[in-house]
Image (cartoon, rainbow, N blue to C red):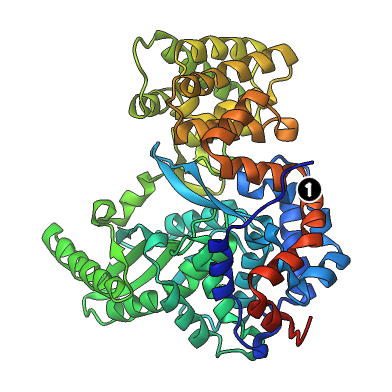
């Protein structure tokens, strides 16, 4: 039997502060059965017949217990789910960024995750959205289509940017440390304002404090959360975008324009009545950027000047779509065929075999850029060239590598063990998709060797954890004794997440429910009474 999930007194103090203080908010969630089933099924359908590519979603692969009517009636309808110890689990983990750095994220219980996703959907349904046709705004996922993956919305964003060929000039902007800088208190002020304080969503206090709890006091970064992306991009930034649109409209020389946003990235496309010199373009772009930066500062955000770009809109045609490693497939179909991709992969292996010395992230990206370059157009989007990284993604996720190629890759990884830390998602995917069982296991072993070696030498770090997680996600049962011991020793919270939610979610909830009410009553009796309107024991 697995060790039960335990909360300390400090946890109960925090939870007690989150829960309502009187009987008016007895049902603190107010999640109706339709919303719960819609959100749960959104993930069930997205993960059906596919393997999971991020740890946060792993428990949702086998969550039939959560989708039943009996679970909703027993735990969600009256909000009793919040007194399960299993509900309140959280820990820190890491994911890899496109630039090779790591980003800290919060792993939360699938119960917290789904409750937050339900809240996001409820706000989406009640949100009085801006109807300005000059604003095109996207977030990760799509509630309209019940799609939790970012692929489709990001592809639509790229298509919109590249299809707007009628504009002469562009500005590209980015927000620095977007999620970490969001004021949760201000966000909920905006939620109340933009949902007309709907009486069916009167449990705002609980959800506001739940977000603070999940984010360790800040707006939480939870991998692939549709709700958090929607609230941040579509609601928190809505007034900023509307204000910027009005400001651009007031500039006499600007003839027409369009703003296209994906989360914290935004393009401003515009035409002017006269052709601009370089100095005139710099001046107008500077005015727009300063106004945008000022408006952002009013809500505690900062424009990332290092990522600002502007120029002639025809230059956008050269922008290459280079997705992060967070998705399991390339964003765009294209004309490049399988034989050509195999050629590129062998060029890639040639370059790695010939390289003498330590390979860092820049060197590795240079090798991919030089060996996977291909000028195929991307489907219907004739202005976009698929980047070398995207070509590599397409090859890894759409086709199987030959035994000869895998044999060569094993040799390359043995000679350059740091490749595991530079490209864990794609390399472990190649291993998983290898048909020959012996080759598959040999490649897995070669990729895992540097992880074990770092642990043995007391050099375990975030890259070891990320690589270890990739191995577990690509194998059945998340079982590897030595790796699991290393994760437990260095990242015990992540190990608890795997034990309680990935391996035995149903049993965790069943066993937890027997004792949680009693424990909760002992630790926080006032909160318990208020939550369930209990007058006596």
* 364 vs 503, nearest the viewer: 503
**Placement of the N terminus among the 4 image quadrants:** top right
Please say whether residue 387 is visible from this viewpoint. Answer: yes
Q: Name the side, left or right, on which 79 lies relative to 143.
A: right
Q: Could you tell me which quadrant the C terminus lies in?
A: bottom right
- Expressed as whole percent of the image width and height from the top left, the position of residue 511 reads 81, 54
Q: Position of residue 36 (x, y in %)?
A: 75, 69
Q: Residue furthest left?
A: 279
Place residue 184 in its image quadrant.
bottom left
The answer to which of 347 and 237 lies nearer the viewer is: 237
Q: Residue at x 62, y 44 (%)?
A: 55
Query: Horizontal placement of 351 versus 446: left or right?
Result: left
70 vs 41, left or right, is right
Q: Residues within 10 Å of mark 1 (few under 14, many from 20)?
A: some
Q: 524 or 365: which is nearer to us?
A: 524
Q: Is residue 382 above or below residue 482?
A: below
Q: Quadrant of residue 409?
A: top right
In the image, taking residue 149 as reference, residue 27 lies left or right, namely right
Give the residue at x 72% y 63%: 84
Q: Nearer the viewer, residue 233 or 151?
A: 233
Q: Tell me what residue is drawn at x 46 percent, y 33 percent.
A: 463
- The residue that appears at 46% across and 28% down in the rendered structure is 421
Q: Is residue 230 visible?
A: no
Q: Indicate the position of residue 530 as horizontal and vertical percent values.
A: 67, 83
Q: What residue did someone put label 1 on?
A: 62
Q: Secondary structure at mark 1?
A: helix
Find residue 393 and report its horizontal and vertical position in percent. 55, 34
Q: How many marks?
A: 1
């Amino acid at each position: 039997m697995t060790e039960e999930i335990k909360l300390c007194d400090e946890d109960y103090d925090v939870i007690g502060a989150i829960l309502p203080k009187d009987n008016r908010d007895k049902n603190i969630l107010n999640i109706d059965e339709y919303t719960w089933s819609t959100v749960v099924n959104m993930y069930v359908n997205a993960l059906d017949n596919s393997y999971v590519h991020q740890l946060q979603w792993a428990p949702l692969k086998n969550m039939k217990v959560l989708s039943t009517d009996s679970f909703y009636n027993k735990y969600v309808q009256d909000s009793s789910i919040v007194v399960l110890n299993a509900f309140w689990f959280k820990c820190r983990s890491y994911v890899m960024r496109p630039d090779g750095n790591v980003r800290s994220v919060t792993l939360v219980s699938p119960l917290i995750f789904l409750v937050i996703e339900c809240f996001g959907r409820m706000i989406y349904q009640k949100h009085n959205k801006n109807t300005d046709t000059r604003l095109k705004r996207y977030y990760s996922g799509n509630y309209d289509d019940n799609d939790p993956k970012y692929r489709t919305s990001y592809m639509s964003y790229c298509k919109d940017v590249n299809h707007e060929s009628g504009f002469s000039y562009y500005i590209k902007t980015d927000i620095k440390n977007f999620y970490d800088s969001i004021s949760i208190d201000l966000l909920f002020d905006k939620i109340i304002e933009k949902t007309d304080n709907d009486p069916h969503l009167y449990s705002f206090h609980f959800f506001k404090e739940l977000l603070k709890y999940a984010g360790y006091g800040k707006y939480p970064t939870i991998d692939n959360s549709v709700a958090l992306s929607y609230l941040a991009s579509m609601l928190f930034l809505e007034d900023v975008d509307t204000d910027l649109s009005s400001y651009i409209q007031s500039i006499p020389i600007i003839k027409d324009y369009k703003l296209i946003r994906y989360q914290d990235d935004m393009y401003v496309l515009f035409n002017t009545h006269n052709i601009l010199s370089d100095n005139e373009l710099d001046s107008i772009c500077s005015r727009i950027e300063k106004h945008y930066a000022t408006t952002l500062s009013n809500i505690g955000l900062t424009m990332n000047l290092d990522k600002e770009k502007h120029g002639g809109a025809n230059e956008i045609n050269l922008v290459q779509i280079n997705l992060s490693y967070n998705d399991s497939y390339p964003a765009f179909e294209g004309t490049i065929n399988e034989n050509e991709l195999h050629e590129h992969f062998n060029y890639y292996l040639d370059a790695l075999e010939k390289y003498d010395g330590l390979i860092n992230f820049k060197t590795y990206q240079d090798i991919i850029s030089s060996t996977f370059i291909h000028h195929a157009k991307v489907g219907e989007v004739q202005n976009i060239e698929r980047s070398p990284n995207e070509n590599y993604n397409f090859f890894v996720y759409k086709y199987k590598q030959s035994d000869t190629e895998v044999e060569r890759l094993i040799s390359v990884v043995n000679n350059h063990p740091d490749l595991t830390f530079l490209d864990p998602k794609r390399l472990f995917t190649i291993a998983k998709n290898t048909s020959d069982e012996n080759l598959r296991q040999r490649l897995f072993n070669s990729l895992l060797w540097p992880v074990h070696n770092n642990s043995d030498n007391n050099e375990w770090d975030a890259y070891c954890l990320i690589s270890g997680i990739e191995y577990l996600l690509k194998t059945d049962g998340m079982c590897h004794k030595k790796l699991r011991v290393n994760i437990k020793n260095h990242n015990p919270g992540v190990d608890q997440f795997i034990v309680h939610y990935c391996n035995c979610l149903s049993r965790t909830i069943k066993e937890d429910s027997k004792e949680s009410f009693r424990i909760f009553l002992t630790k926080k009796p006032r909160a318990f009474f208020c939550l369930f309107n209990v007058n006596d024991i």
